[in-house]
Image: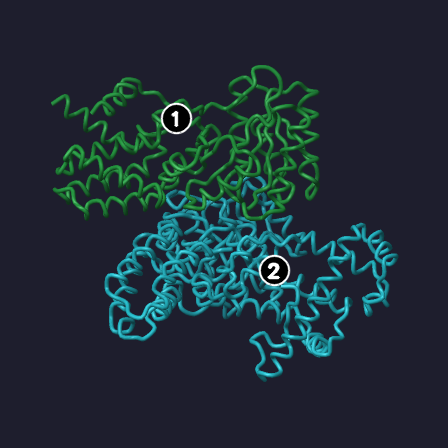
Chain colours: A green, B cyan
Amino acid sequence: MSFFKRMKEKFTNQSETVTEKFKDGLEKTRNSFSTRVNELVKNYRKVDEEFFEELEEILIEADVGVATVMDLIDELKDEARRQNIKDTEKLQVVISEKLAEFLEKEDEDNKLNIQEDGLTVILFVGVNGVGKTTSIGKLAHKLKQEGKTVMMAAGDTFRAGAIDQLQVWGDRVGVDVVKHSEGSDPAAVVYDAVQSAKSRGVDVLLCDTAGRLQNKVNLMNELEKIKRVIGREIPNAPHEVLLVVDATTGQNAMSQAKTFSQTTDVSGLVLTKLDGTAKGGIVLAIRHELEIPVKLVGLGEKVDDLYEFDADRFVYGLFSDLIMEEQDETIN
Amino acid sequence: MAFEGLADRLQQTLQKVRGKGKVTEADVKVMMREVRLALLEADVNFKVVKQFIAKVKERAIGQEVLESLTPGQQVVKVVNEELTELMGGEQSKIAVANKPPTVIMMVGLQGAGKTTTTGKLANHLRKKNNRKPLLVAADVYRPAAINQLQTLGKQLSMPVFDLGTDVSPVEIAKQGIEKAKEEHHDYVIIDTAGRLHIDEGLMDELSQIKEIAKPDEILLVVDAMTGQDAVNVAQSFHDQLGLSGVVLTKLDGDTRGGAALSIKSVTNTPIKFIGMGEKLDALEPFHPERMASRILGMGDVLSLIEKAQTNVDEKKAKELEEKMRTMSFTFEDFLDQLTQVRSMGPLDELLGMLPGSGQMKQLKNVKVDEKQLNHVEAIIKSMTKAEKVQPEIINASRKKRIAKGSGRTVQEVNRLLKQFEDMKKMMKQMSNMQQKGKKKGGMGGMKFPFM
């Protein structure tokens, strides 16, 4: 019970807008997920094999991923045996607690590594169509709001119209874009951008790259080169390599995270389109199976709908109904 | 390679059963659990998995398998048949309207690949069906989406109709179709903006476009990497618009593509095309039976043959076979073949289609380095005509010259010469074997000496 209490104390007294946004953005996931767990608890009085099998299905359907689900179910079974829980309603609390445990990692840094002084370079990578360019536009806006000077590098020289797309974002949020023509060498674009960011004393440089599938060796090598070029110009740069992942992606997200990490040392994830899917479960799998922290989440289509990821808020967004119920009970 | 993960899993499971004399019901149960996990890991929707397992299990436990002498193979057969059926039975073609122009509407989530697929489809229609499509840019929301389509149009030298971003997509569609009629285009492809299936306002806009455009095809473009949600997406687009088909994109990635299995079974909408790469000709018709075979590791020989047929000159292939038999195969022929095979597409893709390639460990992680092939080409091209025909005359000083000319090392030249000799020997053996058996291999006159 301590877990719910902690959550409750942390969030119910303060109606922060960001917390609300997490709650709204995760509405679909919460509805499909919590509702189904509730139904399950109602349908099954007793904790038995069948109950766990159904639970397994609910979790898998939320894209939590087979390996993570199996781990979770095993731990739940152990826990149920240890505490001798026979009643499904009692187990419900344990389920939420376990999920929260999976989500939370001790001393993990979700903050973007922005340098106090000097230039910060952030490289964006990912497969096609996950929302790299859009995320850059949103992040540029966010950083500008925080008073930073920002520059963008149009490193996607491959896809038709990608440079224009970034330029439109640049005009929209009022940020300079360094670009070459379509089909030019992306490493050269990035090199120029670094030079010009240095000479103009910009705070943050955001580098776009073309979407690439992680099994294309040559394209991955190209990415490595881009990273190398940045590192040669500025020691310790890029300060962040952010892998952008579409939240509707299934288990392939794991393969993406692994392969991109091998070539570019991904330092964090940006999870986009989280509001559109009822399957936010992939966050759980990523956090359970990988060592890469989720740094930013996209919770809507507006320019300011990009947020720093916060495990507590995520858990709250996922279980706010349950937490509220709990609260009612304590009042009664 | 798409689906290979699934093929591996199933193969491992079935390996245990294969070669077993008798199968008990308990065996089937264990097997089904493995198949279930494999399918779930491949992002197949869990409801679909459930149905699938139930069906296979019924047939497996039934007499069909238990009574058969080769139960393992029977199960493979059953799984294969059911997979094929699940993915849509026969292949379906693109519609043709009675009265031109045929209108095709592309819909889908953001980032699925609608605009790219629009370009690919237009290219496909012109190349394979000899049509003259007009592209209509109705994505007024995403920055520079219209520019993207215009750029694609330029690359294909095809007209693109647009009215900027200030006109409603409904109006753009209407005027686009009128223009197509005036200019006698036989196909109109409308590229719409990506939208969430739960966004009522935008979904309503699609219904309005449908009202006006009366499309003959509404194609849903789905990212093959989509997880469990693929079914919901397809379902709600289908409920609101009445889809006529699905295009599965990014299948050249390493996704297991379970979405393909789910969509058809839940929405009863056929998968018409698959996107297999970033180039504009990387759109292929979907073959459910081939895909099922591929899942089971039986290789995609049919696709390979088809590729070979469109790209290989038959007469040349005959000549080649003759040369192989008589050992008069030269570096010139080799170069010829190299170009032909490479024109079929990236080599690792071709390798993936070969039967059993999923099983062969050494092939599994082969990343054919196209650069290496460039080097080989360079070396051969640095030889004189006489050297190409009679490699025996290549002595040390000639080797040095060739190495210099191609910018490679003498060692590399040596290696190539040695490999070429070995290959010739092997080819002779192979063609001798064929002659004896009086049986021609499934690939007709085609040989891939360096594979």
In the picture, measured across the screen, residue B288 lies left or right of residue B407, that is left
Q: Nearer the viewer, residue B356 or B417?
A: B417
Task: Please state the horizontal and vertical placement of residue A15, each as a whole percent of the image.
Answer: 31, 20
Q: Quadrant of residue A239?
A: top right
Residue lying at the far top in this picture: please name it. Answer: A117
Q: Nearer the viewer, residue A306 or A224?
A: A224
Circle 2: is it few (<14), some (14-19), or many (20+) Cα within 10 Å? many
Please tell me whether residue B440 is drawn above or below residue B158 in the rendered image. below
Q: Say yes or no: labels 2 and 1 on the same chain.
A: no
Q: Is residue B179 in sight in this rendering?
A: no
Residue at the image point whose x is 65% and y is 57% from the top = B158
> How far, Cα to Cα, is label 2 from label 1?
46 Å
Residue B380, position as x, y percentages in the image:
78, 60
Quick check: B90 left or right of B171? left
Give the number of the disc on residue A310.
Answer: 1
Q: Which residue carries the number 2 mark?
A: B123
Residue mark closest to the camera, 2 vs 1: 1
Nearest to the observer: residue B20 or residue A177: B20
Marked residue chain, label 1: A
At label 1, the amino acid type is Asp
Instruction: State whether residue B188 appears in this view.
Output: yes
Up the image or down, B12 lies above or below A71; here it is below
